[in-house]
Image: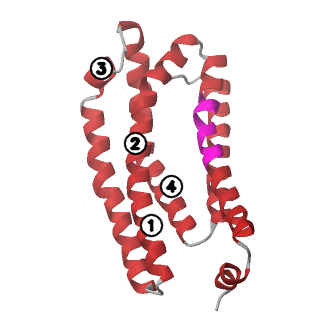
Amino acid sequence: MGQQEKALAQEGVGHLLLRFSIPIMLSYLVSELYSMVDTFFVGNYIGGLGVRSLNVVFPVQRILIAVAMMVALGVQTEVSNLLGQKHTEEASTLMNEGNKLVLAINIPLIVLLFLVRAPLLVALGAGKELMAASEVYLTGILPGALFLAWGIYLTQLLLALGKGRQAMVATVIGALVNLVLDYLLVAKAGIGVG
């Protein structure tokens, strides 16, 4: 019996709940800080037009995140069940198939969003004043959406494998990279959203 199995068998429910839930909660908190950091830098270094452009594109980002979470949580649940039943080979196969599913859903979705970006932004409220900046921002984030989906998927797999701390560390590293890139690209280089 491994160390994690011993802990699950011997520790109290309250202690286990804290042990597993705190890294998950911190991971979600850090991931939500992404948009706050972006808004801070854009608001302070670009201004109101930039923040309004972020707000127009924000629902598209949330949809991309929701699609990635849908795949990740579905695979995570079944992997957890298979591992609980000691079916490690099936769990491994499912994780690999989930990886393919992330690609199969997100690549066409990203291409579709790119192709319909102008009418989509109009539907989301981008008028003439916001259209150019919103389109530049959406076009800029779409290539990274695939990496975002993979990151969400892999983080959820780490949670399924009982590696909450590693999932939290991965999320924090991503947030720190976002912070540094925002600082370098927006604050120092003057690259904006449009």
Q: Position of residue 30 (x, y in %)?
A: 65, 45
Q: Secondary structure at mark 1?
A: helix
Which element is circle 4 on? helix
Q: Position of residue 76 (x, y in %)?
A: 46, 65
- Residue 64 circle label: 2
Number of callouts in the render?
4
The earlier-in-sequence mark between 3 and 1 is 1
Q: Earlier in the sequence, mark 4 or mark 1?
A: 1
Give the distance between the C-alpha atoms of the residues marked 3 and 1, in whole angstroms. Answer: 35 Å
Task: Compute the Cα span from label 1 to label 2.
Answer: 20 Å
Q: CA distance from mark 4 to mark 1?
A: 17 Å
Q: Which mark is residue 21?
A: none
Residue 62 at x, y percent in the picture: 44, 37
Amino acid type indicated by mark 2: Leu
Crowd band around label 2 with a 10 angstrom C-alpha radius: few (<14), some (14–19), many (20+): many
- Seen as rendered, the residue at the extreme top is 129
Kind of residue indicated by mark 1 = Thr
Residue marked by disc 3: 123
Depth-wise, is mark 1 or mark 2 nearer the camera?
A: 1
The residue under the point 59% across, 13% down is 47
Our reading of the magenta stretch's main secondary structure is helix
- 29 in the magenta segment: yes
Q: Secondary structure at mark 3?
A: helix
Mark 4 vs mark 1, foreground winner is 1
List the single residue furthest toward the bottom: 1
Q: Amino acid at mark 3?
A: Ala
- Give above or below for 34 relative to 15: above
Label 4, label 2: how far apart the Cα atoms are: 12 Å
For residue 151, the mark is: 4
Q: Quadrant of residue 110?
A: top left
